[in-house]
Amino acid sequence: MRPRLLRRAATVVAALAVVAGCAAAPAGDAPETIVFLNPHAGAYDDVVAEFEARNPDIRVEQQSVPFDQMVSQTQARLASGDTSVDVVSVDPPRLAGMVTQGFLTDESASADLLESTSSQVGINSVTVDDRPWAYPLWTSDAFLFYNRDALTRAGVPIPGPSDADRLTWDQVLDGARTVAEADTARYGFGIDQVDRYYALQPILESMGAGPGLEGPDSLTAAVDTPEWKRFGAWYRDLYTDGLAPRGVDPGQMADLFASGGLGFYLSGASSITKIAESDLAGNWGIAPAPYVAGGPVVTPTDSWGVGISAYSEKQDAARRFAQFMTLDPEGVSAASRTMNLPPVATAAMPAYLDHLAEVAPAETAGIGDLLEIDLERHARHRPTSVGYVQFETTLNRAFTDLRNGGDVDSVLATAQDTLVRQLDRQRELAGDH
């Protein structure tokens, strides 16, 4: 059931005519080549092919770099005024820093187009100082995947699929311990994005902790509060107690679940195809992401968008590609199929849900309603700050230390001290721009 998502999609199609325009290369002229820097090798092949078929006057050259090198590549190339990059993938929490450094074009002229085609939560993710500086492509959510056979054989109830069925973390971990004790899966529980702030922020905030950055400019660290320490002990104990696996990278977690190694698995929609095509096919399900009893339900949101380099000498062509990829339903659908991530363009949502229904019809039957409720009621953005890169890097390192059994007070005190120094420096640099 997808009522409001589908209704809104039907109202915005007319606004997309401006995006869907095609142009032919003048006879004898070679296509203009633009360069798209991104961290998702292979994910955009279909959308590039479709765009080039419609726009023979433009050719798109993809330059894909590993995820953990994207920030350094962007910083190095755009800070030096490199004109060879025209379109660049943008992670929303890093947007403020890119804007402050003058890396991106102001897309305010497309504000009305964005309003008529995209969800507000997506527009917010690319807005700094009330102006859009990029085009939002995907949003995101987290779900509780479960191994039906492992739960059934251990006597653990199968979770329901709707918002009303949402479990608390205590209920999930009790079930995970039962699975582990019954030895129906190697581990009771696992998190897809191990040690990453994106995955852990919702749990922190459901426990009553703040996001870790405070103040009007989000440059004041607050990661050693009692609530953060409570979370630190909770997270460390998942691993020291053996409930969740140590030494498994994020890129290996979906494989571990798909091979039957986990009872419960916190992940996003990007895992669906891999699981549906694995030996676990037909033996798994999706439930809402858990919350902490007595606390609010908090779910993640935001995903990658695309911006236009302020140093590009081909900004008109770059903008045509960026708008096709993020606002045109066919462009968005082509960009969403490989990664399985929910689109921000509302007109593309029906095709996205249909695609999930083809991949895993029974398991994803309620995912449209759940996405809508989570995005409207429970989603929390990551902090927008010129110091986000330093914040995330320092915290991800602290989460790793906790997972390895570090002392909670010591790990978080070190992170707090480091962030105070780093954010003071970022405040100074921001004042220089």
Image (cartoon, helix red, strand yellow):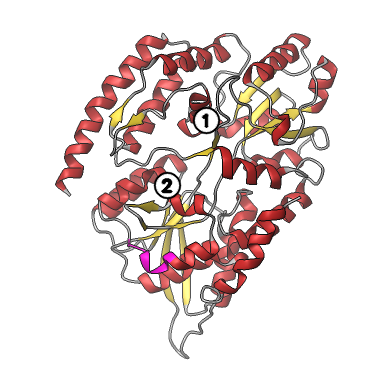
Q: Are marks 2 and 1 in contact (CB under 8 Å)?
A: no
Q: Which badge, 2 or 1, comes first in the chain's sequence?
A: 2
Measured as percent of width and height from the top left, residue 83 is found at: 29, 63
Q: Is residue 266 visible?
A: yes
Residue ID for mark 2 = 92
Residue 90's tag is none
Task: Give SS at disc 2.
Answer: helix
The residue carrying pointer 1 sits among few (fewer than 14), some (14 to 19) or many (20 or more) residues within 10 Å by Cα, namely many
Kind of residue indicated by mark 1 = Pro
Picture residue at 52% right of the left edge, 73% below the top: 19
Picture residue at 68% right of the left edge, 20% below the top: 172
Picture residue at 75% right of the left edge, 43% below the top: 366
Residue ID for mark 1 = 202
Measured as percent of width and height from the top left, residue 391 is found at: 34, 32
The residue carrying pointer 2 sits among few (fewer than 14), some (14 to 19) or many (20 or more) residues within 10 Å by Cα, namely many
Query: Is 424 situated above or below 306?
Result: above
Query: Is 276 situated above or below 225?
Result: below
